[in-house]
């Protein structure tokens, strides 16, 4: 369950439109340059208050699933809010109301609840994101018109997230790959992304 949440909750923030970003860093990019890139990414992530998007997930076994995602990082709750609705045949729901994360499976009628701060959502849904404090940057490299940023989460051996940035016509993040502790990889892409739109709080209630 937590592996599934990690793959999908990473989707909540993985659309960054860096309209003022610079060109792809050269191969000899220095560490300060890396830190500048990370600071720029953090600034845009922290600037995203609401988001709505379609997501397409390709699992390690080749199967795919898709659905709709809603994100809201406004309010007095301890964390932001999130809703993930899977399309048929899966039809599961993941809803975070700012304090509790709830997983609903209509096929089995199972319902599971977790405190957000005990799940991977605690990083993604916090009101201020800081890569330097919460994730270890393993490497950053440029390949053609893409930048690959690989991150490790402390305490989760073997788990890594690779964010893939497109640099033309502007630098933006539109896809990522999550590798679990067994080296299984899951790839996620967002489409039809809308940022800064009004979202009703009823979306995030149980």
Image: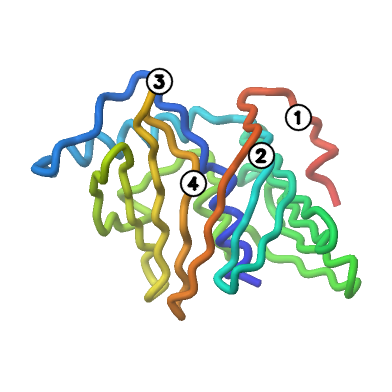
Q: Quadrant of the N terminus?
A: bottom right
Q: Label 3 neighbourhood size at 10 Å, few (<14), some (14-19), many (20+)? A: few
First in residue order: circle 2 vs circle 4: 2
Q: Residue at x 66, y 39 (%)?
A: 71
> Taking 39 as reference, is 22 above or below it?
above
Cα separation, mark 4 vs mark 1, equals 24 Å
Tags 3 and 4 touching, CB below 8 Å: no
Rendered image coloring scheme: rainbow
The disc, 3 or 1, on the residue closer to the chain's N-terminal end is 3
Tag in front: 2 or 4: 4
Of the two numbered discs 4 and 1 in the rendering, the one whose residue sits closer to the viewer: 4
Q: Position of residue 195 (x, y in %)?
A: 61, 27
- Which residue position holds label 3? 19
**The one of 71 and 75 positioned closer to us in this rendering:** 71
| 3D distance between C-alphas at marks 2 and 1 | 8 Å
Mark identifier at residue 175: 4
């Amino acid at each position: 369950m937590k592996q599934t949440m990690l793959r999908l909750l990473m989707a909540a923030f993985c659309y960054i439109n860096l309209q003022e970003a610079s060109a792809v860093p050269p191969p000899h990019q220095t560490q300060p340059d890396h830190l500048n890139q990370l600071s720029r990414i953090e600034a845009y992530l922290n600037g995203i208050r609401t988001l709505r998007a379609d997501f397409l997930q390709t699992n390690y076994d080749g199967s795919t699933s898709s659905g709709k995602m809603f994100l809201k990082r406004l309010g007095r709750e301890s964390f932001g809010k999130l809703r993930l609705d899977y399309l048929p045949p899966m039809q599961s729901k993941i809803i975070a109301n700012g304090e509790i994360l709830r997983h609903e499976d209509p096929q089995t009628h199972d319902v599971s609840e977790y405190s957000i701060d005990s799940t991977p959502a605690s990083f993604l849904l916090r009101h201020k994101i800081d890569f330097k404090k919460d994730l270890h940057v393993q490497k950053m490299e440029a390949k053609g018109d893409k930048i690959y940023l690989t991150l490790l989460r402390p305490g989760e051996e073997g788990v890594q997230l690779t964010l893939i940035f497109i640099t033309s016509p502007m630098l933006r993040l539109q896809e990522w790959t999550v590798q679990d502790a067994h080296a299984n990889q899951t790839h996620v892409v967002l489409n039809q992304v809308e940022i800064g739109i009004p979202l009703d709080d009823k979306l995030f209630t149980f």
